């Protein structure tokens, strides 16, 4: 009765504009089965209505009057129901992906590609697309073809730095700027251009790390953008704080002793009409009319949020709260190692996998990638666990043996993802009848924070086992922010390769649709 009444609601208002946009975005995920797609879509629409209704006072009052027997407080009940349905929906999507297997590869097998060999710590190459139309970038790939490990491979197009760490981000964002105000505006523009709005992948501080936000996910709520901006400001040695308004979160930076608000999620800031100085939250709250003249990114014809939307957010001064930025204890880097034979493919598009923290609204855009590599798992008693570490969120994976024998290998393999408990893996057959271990069972999809590493250890199942090691072919699916990838353009492209390995050798492949 309860679910039928809620599902029948067709007119529920959204809490905030960015959440409305996220709800209105059609899901890109498809199972490939029309009937299952329809059932998943019905579940998705029900969760949206439950979630929206939980945030709507008028809707709650209407429903409460019609169904007096429902428990109280009703908003919490609806929110819990939406979360539960969202969790079930994500489990269904992931189950469908698991059934589909690993056939959907982030690298387009039949696409046009350009490749070039790279070596050492720095190399510049030119890829000439002069005769082609503006290409659609699909994926790029790095394969270690040498005999030594490649530490921290990095690639950029146009000769500029990558987004490898905080210093790299600041170098890109602040190019050509002078003085605190120019730097503050440049950081704002950089975040406007480098992220989008959508349900955050994690509720914890992972998305407040600018390196993770922009390289791994690329989307989040207003608080993620505000906190990331404030973290970048403080990395420059400037003072920052974050304001929690009535339904919105914005950052402030101190410029010449004054607080100035630049909103990367709302894509606007405001200047005093006479002095030209960038205004702070308290000034805007006391002079609401100034919110009617925003400074917006170049090329935009109007503000993202109209005056009628932002005025109540700033004007309700009694619940506006300023506090210090909340960031992870350590800012991440995009550090990793490719052993000989390892391949990392990163795509501008996705195959359905995403870290969703039990949320049910997919972002407008995200990408998947795939890591493959051979590893030898020591099965001696005193052996240390094998660790695979990547800077991208681990979503799914498998470890394939070479055995096609009637019985699986006589050993139990355990896996443990970042912050999780050890999980005993079950041997299954893959599409080639090889005995395979599903690593996805050990990865924390729908948990508080994604995993960036996974450990493997083995226990022989019998005293007659004579092998010294278990040879495995690892495959891991990861999540990547497409805007962080090195895109090629029509004309001559200067490609810069960097690594921390003087003797490293690799092949870099760029996959594209040249129209």
Image (spheres, rainbow, N blue to C red):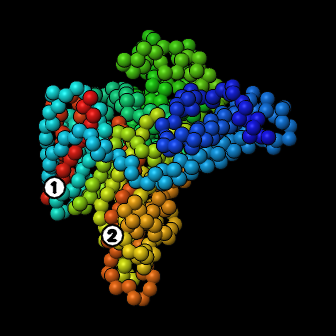
The numbered dot on residue 472 is none
Residue 104 location in percent, x, y? 39, 48
Image-based side of 340 in relation to 272, left or right:
left
Vertical side of 104 occupied by 441: above or below? below
Residue 343 relative to residue 326: left or right: left
Question: Does residue 102 sit above or below 110 in this rendering?
Answer: below
The residue shown at (46%, 34%) is 364
Q: Residue furthest right?
A: 68
Neighbour class for label 1 at 10 Å: few (<14), some, many (≥20)? Answer: many
Quarter assignment of residue 418: bottom left
Residue 11 showing in the rendered view: yes
The part of the image, by quadrant, that contains residue 360 is top right
Residue at the spot 57% in from the left edge and 32% down from the top edge: 23
* Secondary structure state at the residue bearing disc 1: strand
The residue depicted at 86 percent of the width and 37 percent of the height is 68
- Does 326 sit left or right of 12 as displayed? left
Residue 179, relative to residue 219: is it above or below?
above
Residue 504, x across and y down, in percent: 17, 57
Q: Is residue 203 or residue 106 the one in the foreground?
A: 106
- The span from disc 1 to disc 2 (Cα, nearest Å) is 27 Å
Indicate the position of residue 496 as horizontal and vertical percent values: 18, 42
For the N terminus, which image quadrant?
Answer: top right
- SS label for mark 2: loop
Out of 231 and 27, give the one closest to the viewer: 27
Q: Is residue 453 visible?
A: no
Q: Residue at x 34, y 74 (%)?
A: 470
Q: Which residue is mark 2?
A: 402
Mark 2 closeness class: few <14, some 14–19, many ≥20 residues within 10 Å = some
Residue 416 versus residue 270: which sits nearer the camera?
Answer: 416
Per the image, the residue denoted by label 1 is 505
Tell me the quarter of the image containing the C terminus.
top left
């Amino acid at each position: 009765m309860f679910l039928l009444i809620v599902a029948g609601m067709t007119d529920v208002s959204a809490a905030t504009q960015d959440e409305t946009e996220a709800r209105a975005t059609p899901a890109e995920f498809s199972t490939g089965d029309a009937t299952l797609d329809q059932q998943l879509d019905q579940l998705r629409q029900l969760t949206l209505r439950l979630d929206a209704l939980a945030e709507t006072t008028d809707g709650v009052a209407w429903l409460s009057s019609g169904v007096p027997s429902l428990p109280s407080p009703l908003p919490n009940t609806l929110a819990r129901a939406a979360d539960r349905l969202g969790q079930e929906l994500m489990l269904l999507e992931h189950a469908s992906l698991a059934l589909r297997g690993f056939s959907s590869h982030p690298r387009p097998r039949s696409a046009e590609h350009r490749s070039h060999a790279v070596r050492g710590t720095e190399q510049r190459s030119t890829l000439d697309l002069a005769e082609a139309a503006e290409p659609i970038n699909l994926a790029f790939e790095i394969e270690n073809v040498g005999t030594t490990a490649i530490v921290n491979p990095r690639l950029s197009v146009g000769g500029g730095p990558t987004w490898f760490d905080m210093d790299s981000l600041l170098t890109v964002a602040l190019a050509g700027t002078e003085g605190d105000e120019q730097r503050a505006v440049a950081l704002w523009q950089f975040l406007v251009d480098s992220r989008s709005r959508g349900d955050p992948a994690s509720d914890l501080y992972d998305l407040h790390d600018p390196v993770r936000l922009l390289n791994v996910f690329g989307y989040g709520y207003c608080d993620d953008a505000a906190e990331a901006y404030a973290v970048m400001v403080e990395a420059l040695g400037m003072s920052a704080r974050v304001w929690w308004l009535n339904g919105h979160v914005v950052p402030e930076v101190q410029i010449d002793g004054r607080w100035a608000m630049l909103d990367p999620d709302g894509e606007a800031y405001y200047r005093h009409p006479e002095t030209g100085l960038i205004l702070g939250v308290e000034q805007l709250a006391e002079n609401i009319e100034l919110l009617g003249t925003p400074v917006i990114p170049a090329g935009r014809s109007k503000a993202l949020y109209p005056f009628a939307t932002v005025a109540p957010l700033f004007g309700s001064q009694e619940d506006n709260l300023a506090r210090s930025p909340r960031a992870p204890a350590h800012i991440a880097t995009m550090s990793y190692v490719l052993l000989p034979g390892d391949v990392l493919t990163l795509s501008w598009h996705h195959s359905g996998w995403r870290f969703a923290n039990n949320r049910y609204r997919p972002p407008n855009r995200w990408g998947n990638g795939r890591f493959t590599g051979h590893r030898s798992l020591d099965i001696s008693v005193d052996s240390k666990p094998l660790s695979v570490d990547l800077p991208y969120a681990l979503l799914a994976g498998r470890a394939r043996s070479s055995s096609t024998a009637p019985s699986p290998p006589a050993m139990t393999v355990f896996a443990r993802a970042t912050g999780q408990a050890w999980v005993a893996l079950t041997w299954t057959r893959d599409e080639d009848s090889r005995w395979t271990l599903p690593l996805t069972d050990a990865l924390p999809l729908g948990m508080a924070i994604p995993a960036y590493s996974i450990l493997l250890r083995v226990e022989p199942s019998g005293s007659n086992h004579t092998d010294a090691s278990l040879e495995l072919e690892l495959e891991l699916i990861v999540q990547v922010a497409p805007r962080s990838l090195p895109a090629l353009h029509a004309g001559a492209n200067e490609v810069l390769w960097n690594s921390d390995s003087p003797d490293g050798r690799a092949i870099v492949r760029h996959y594209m649709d040249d129209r």
